[in-house]
Amino acid sequence: MVVVALGGTSASAADGDPDEKQEVRNVAAVKLLKEHKDMSLVYVKGLVCPSCAIGIRVKLSKLPFVDSTRYKRGIDMDAKTQLLKIALLPMVKANAEEVEKAITDAGYEPVERYWLEGDKLRTTTFASVKKSK
């Protein structure tokens, strides 16, 4: 688990467009997490247009903890920040390993999962990212 400090550099998306800076993503993550309850928030590298979410939506919407009545079949995304919102059923937690596998199976790279502890943004890096470093 990591406490996120603002600041950082941008990476490059798979299509060559730069990913949003970590600072911008962190600010957006805090805002989204404060506004939306029963949601899991994931940074997905290469998620740069609305059609990117189609394959991810197909895979994630089948998971037992996803509330497919919210967003579009339970999934919403912001191409600018590469943040993926996963609507969760009330009082149910997402299984990080299943989320990671679904996103990877859709052809994308899940990088980090975000949540709030009080007002502090916390992140954890997915196992596949840790192994590739």
Image (cartoon, helix red, strand yellow):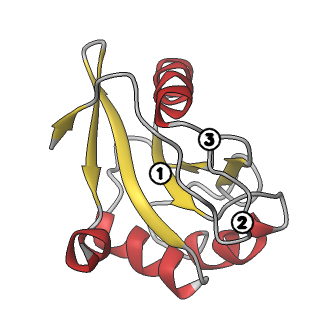
Q: CA distance from mark 2 to mark 3?
A: 12 Å
Picture layout, residue 59 above or below residue 116? below
Picture residue at 41% right of the left edge, 80% below the top: 101
Residue 133 shows in this picture: yes
Horizontal placement of 103 versus 125: left or right? right
Occupied quadrant, residue 44: bottom right
**Pointer 2 local density, CA inside 10 Å: few below 14, some 14–19, many at least 20:** few
Identify the residue position indicated by label 1 in the image.
Answer: 42
Q: Residue 54's spot in the image, x, y percent?
A: 77, 71
- Which one is in front in this view, the residue at disc 1 or the one at disc 3? 3
Q: Residue at x 30, y 76 (%)?
A: 128
Name the N-terminal-most of marks 1 and 3: 3
User: As displayed, is residue 39 above or below residue 100?
Assistant: above
Q: Position of residue 59 (x, y in %)?
A: 60, 79
Horizontal relation, residue 117 to residue 14: left or right:
left
Q: Position of residue 31 (x, y in %)?
A: 54, 19
Front: mark 2 or 1: 2
Quarter where residue 60 is shown: bottom right
* Tag 2 residue: 16
Residue bearing the label numbered 3? 20
- Callout 1: few (<14), some (14-19), or many (20+) C-alpha neighbours within 10 Å? many
- Front residue (pair 66, 105): 105
What's under tag 2, amino acid-wise? Gly
Which x, y percent locates residue 29? Answer: 50, 30
Which of the two residues, 101 or 62, is positioned nearer the viewer here? 101
Kindly identify the residue that appears in the image at 55 percent across and 36 percent down.
21
- Kindly state the secondary structure of the residue where label 2 is placed: loop
